[in-house]
């Protein structure tokens, strides 16, 4: 049953809870991390090439986990199959979501195949790990060439899928904002800025997430963190935050200033955000700690290159984006349609639609990420920054975004030493 403790007369309650708060957040992480994965491929940011495979894996893991939020919110999860058998297109938003999600999964599978094909071809020659070698052979789909022609073909596939994927990523996340913005019956949701805010904040959250994941895996494997990568990510983060702050100020002007806002919108915005239960989550967590403080903390080149400062600011940015989702989902439902009271939005810790289910969804995403990082040769582009004293196979330091050599002659990427020394494992130990 939905929560039943609320202010006022109790004639209304919020039916969209933490799962629907988490759904636009996790889908935004999908889109944002995919954008990071394509910066080196589409926009020439070669400094970010080493982390592009990792960002693609993060995006795909979150993409697979995203439907769990909708499933967790459903009252009858056993009937989820009817989304396919009784698809009402274009009238059902969930049916549209399913079509976009399936298209996105297929496209990312094609891109991941091209990104890691050459690396899997090299891994297929491993002698010491027959299981992983066999899986690598399967993942190449029989195409194991590492010559210049094969490399160019992989790069073309990656560029095309990255370009199309950017559009689908924005569609995948932007349509959620469109659903909220198109609800004219909810004064705080009926805004043309909602889809744009969702997309920009998605980019912000994706950059911050990849920053934290990079720090985590570097710490786990004992790699030296490349401060140039950190600074480059922070430059993009600052740019996205500035645009996000501008849109937030426009939204604040259009909703919180009587001269610009419709009467009903202004009244509820004033009651909820200026004087009500969303005061701290909006001004302190979403705007203050989530946008303004990171902008100040990353204002100089020295601060942008600081690993500790960057990690803390990335965490605050993620928190601020999640608070933005909370304020949108909760705020729209707190504005009563029956009485003049404020409908409460209680936080449930266990059971249906609770913190427990949110943690479970992200736990599944982490498990998927770990499984994909075990399956795919994603470390090759990063091991040049390893601080480990363990030997690394010759030629692997030159492996780039698509798992193929960027600096060595054609056909010499991932030499035979790779078949005998699986250097993309922790410490380079077999």
Image (cartoon, rainbow, N blue to C red):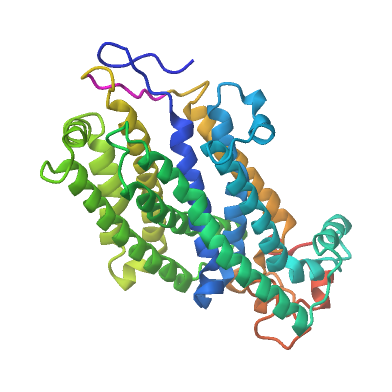
Estimate the x, y position of residue 410 in percent, counting from the top left: 75, 86
Estimate the x, y position of residue 148 in percent, counting from the top left: 75, 84
Q: Is residue 199 left or right of residue 247?
A: right
**Which of 419/256 is in front?**
256
Image quarter of the C terminus: bottom right
Estimate the x, y position of residue 203 in percent, counting from the top left: 43, 57
Res 66 visible: no
- Examine the image and state in which quarter residue 6 appears: top left
Residue 262 against residue 32 in the figure, above or below: above
Q: Is residue 256 left or right of residue 191?
A: left
- Examine the image and state in which quarter residue 41 appears: bottom right
Q: Is residue 316 left or right of residue 18?
A: left
Instruction: Kindly report the secondary structure that dominates the magenta region of the rendered protein.
Output: loop
**Which of 15/21 is in front?**
15
Q: Residue furthest bottom?
A: 409
Residue 228 against residue 410 in the figure, above or below: above
Queried whether the magenta region covers residue 407, the answer comes back as no
Give the residue at x 38% y 23%.
Answer: 14
- Magenta segment range? 341-347
**Which of 183/258 is in front?**
183
Res 387 visible: yes
Estimate the x, y position of residue 307 in percent, counting from the top left: 42, 63
Q: Residue furthest top?
A: 9
Q: Is residue 270 left or right of residue 400?
A: left
Give the residue at x 27% y 27%.
Answer: 335
Queried whether the magenta region covers residue 343, the answer comes back as yes
Q: How many marks?
A: 0
């Amino acid at each position: 049953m939905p929560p039943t403790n609320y202010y006022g007369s109790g004639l209304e309650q919020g039916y969209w809870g933490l799962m629907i708060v988490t759904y636009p957040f996790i889908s935004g992480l999908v889109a944002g991390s995919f954008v990071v994965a394509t910066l080196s491929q589409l926009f020439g940011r070669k400094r970010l090439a080493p982390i592009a495979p990792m960002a693609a894996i993060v995006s795909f893991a979150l993409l697979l986990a995203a439907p769990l939020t909708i499933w967790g919110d459903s009252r009858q999860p056993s009937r989820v199959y009817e989304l396919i058998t009784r698809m009402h297109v274009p009238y059902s938003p969930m049916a549209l979501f399913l079509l976009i999600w399936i298209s996105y999964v297929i496209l990312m599978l094609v891109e991941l195949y091209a990104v890691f094909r050459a690396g899997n071809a090299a891994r297929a020659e491993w002698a010491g790990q027959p299981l992983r070698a066999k899986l690598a052979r399967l993942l190449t789909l029989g195409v194991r060439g590492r010559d210049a022609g094969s490399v160019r073909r992989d790069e073309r596939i990656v560029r095309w899928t990255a370009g199309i994927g950017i559009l689908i990523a924005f569609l995948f996340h932007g349509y959620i904002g469109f659903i909220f913005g198109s609800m004219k019956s909810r004064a705080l949701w009926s805004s043309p800025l909602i889809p744009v805010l969702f997309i920009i904040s998605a980019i912000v959250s994706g950059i911050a997430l990849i920053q934290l994941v990079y720090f985590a895996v570097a710490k786990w494997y004992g790699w030296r963190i490349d401060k140039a990568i950190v600074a480059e990510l922070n430059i993009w983060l600052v740019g996205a935050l500035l645009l996000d702050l501008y849109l937030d100020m426009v939204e604040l002007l259009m909703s919180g200033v009587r001269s610009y806002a419709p009467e009903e919108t202004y009244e509820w915005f004033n009651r909820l955000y200026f004087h009500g239960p969303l005061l701290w989550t909006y001004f302190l967590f979403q705007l203050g700690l989530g946008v303004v403080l990171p902008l100040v903390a990353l204002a100089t080149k020295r601060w942008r290159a600081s690993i500790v400062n960057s990690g803390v600011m990335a965490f605050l940015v993620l928190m601020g984006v999640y608070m933005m989702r909370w304020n949108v989902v909760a705020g729209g439902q707190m504005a009563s349609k029956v009485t003049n009271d404020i409908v409460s939005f209680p936080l449930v810790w266990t059971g249906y639609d609770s913190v427990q289910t949110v943690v479970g969804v992200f736990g599944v995403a982490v498990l998927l990420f770990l499984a994909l990082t075990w399956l795919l040769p994603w470390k090759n582009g990063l091991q040049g920054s390893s601080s480990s004293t363990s030997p690394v196979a010759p030629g692997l330091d030159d492996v780039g975004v698509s798992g193929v050599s960027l600096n060595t002659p054609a056909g010499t990427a991932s030499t035979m030493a790779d078949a005998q020394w699986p250097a993309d494992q922790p410490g380079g130990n077999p």
